[in-house]
Image (cartoon, rainbow, N blue to C red):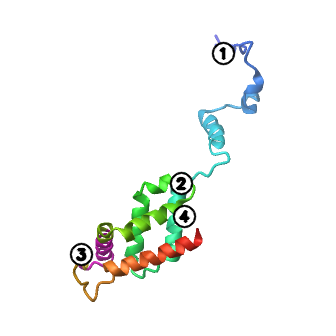
Amino acid sequence: MSIEPEPTPNPEPNQSNTDLPPDILSGRKFTLADAIAAEGSNFFKGESPVPILLRAVTEINGFIDKHLRDSSGALKAVLQDWVKQDSRVSEHIDQPLIALEQILTSITTNSEILYEFVRQVDFKWGQIYGDRPYFQQPGQSPDPEDEYTHDSVQKQLLTLLNHLQDSL
């Protein structure tokens, strides 16, 4: 006794075979992976697979890398971390350098923000070099060996801000 497969029902009258992919119509086994691949190729049609916020942060970080002179790298690293976490980047997603301008302005014009920023830069320097960082306190003279003082960081950020304003 042989068991014959059940015949496949005819498509409903309002369903057209032209809506089906050619692979199905030719008798090839069409898998779920094939369906996902076919739909996935349309998902990014005309769009970059890189999220727009990541592209904005990358543009800002590229500008920082190109225009900020920082031999130890701690200042760049902290500034790039701040950029990554700042909501102004998403507010200026189409013009991310404007967000950088606002971030730099807020750091250089507000002494409390500047002191905290420099503290984080000093801490990062200590992590990079495995050495005790110099933490300059507000109103105190900096240690002569401190690479990142309140004044030196502010000057570097203002120089970066000037480069940025020239390019906008």
What's the amino acid at mark 2? Ile
Q: How crowded is the residue under tag 2: few (<14 C-alpha within 10 Å), some, or many (20+)?
A: some
Q: Is residue 107 left or right of residue 62?
A: left
Of marks 4 and 3, which one's residue comes earlier in the chain?
A: 4
Residue matched to label 2: 93
What's the amino acid at mark 1? Pro
Q: How crowded is the residue under tag 4: few (<14 C-alpha within 10 Å), some, or many (20+)?
A: some
Q: Nearer the viewer, residue 90 or 26?
A: 90
Secondary structure beneath disc 1? loop
Q: Residue at x 73, y 33 (%)?
A: 23
Of marks 4 and 2, which one's residue comes earlier in the chain?
A: 4
Residue 80 seen by the camera: no
Q: Which quarter shows the N terminus?
A: top right
Secondary structure beneath disc 2? loop
Specify whether residue 38 is painted magenta.
Answer: no
Q: Quadrant of residue 24?
A: top right
* Segment tinted magenta in the rendering: 117-132
Q: How crowded is the residue under tag 3: few (<14 C-alpha within 10 Å), some, or many (20+)?
A: few
Q: How crowded is the residue under tag 1: few (<14 C-alpha within 10 Å), some, or many (20+)?
A: few
Q: Is residue 157 left or right of residue 150?
A: right
Of marks 2 and 1, which one's residue comes earlier in the chain?
A: 1
The circle drawn on residue 138 is 3
Residue 100 seen by the camera: yes
Query: In the orientation shown, which residue stands out farthest toward the top?
Result: 1
Mark 2 vs mark 1, foreground winner is 2
66 to 52, vertically: above or below? below
The secondary structure that most of the magenta stretch takes on is helix
Of marks 3 and 2, which one's residue comes earlier in the chain?
A: 2
Residue matched to label 4: 59
Residue matched to label 1: 5
**Label 2, label 1: how far apart the Cα atoms are:** 58 Å
141 to 12, vertically: above or below? below
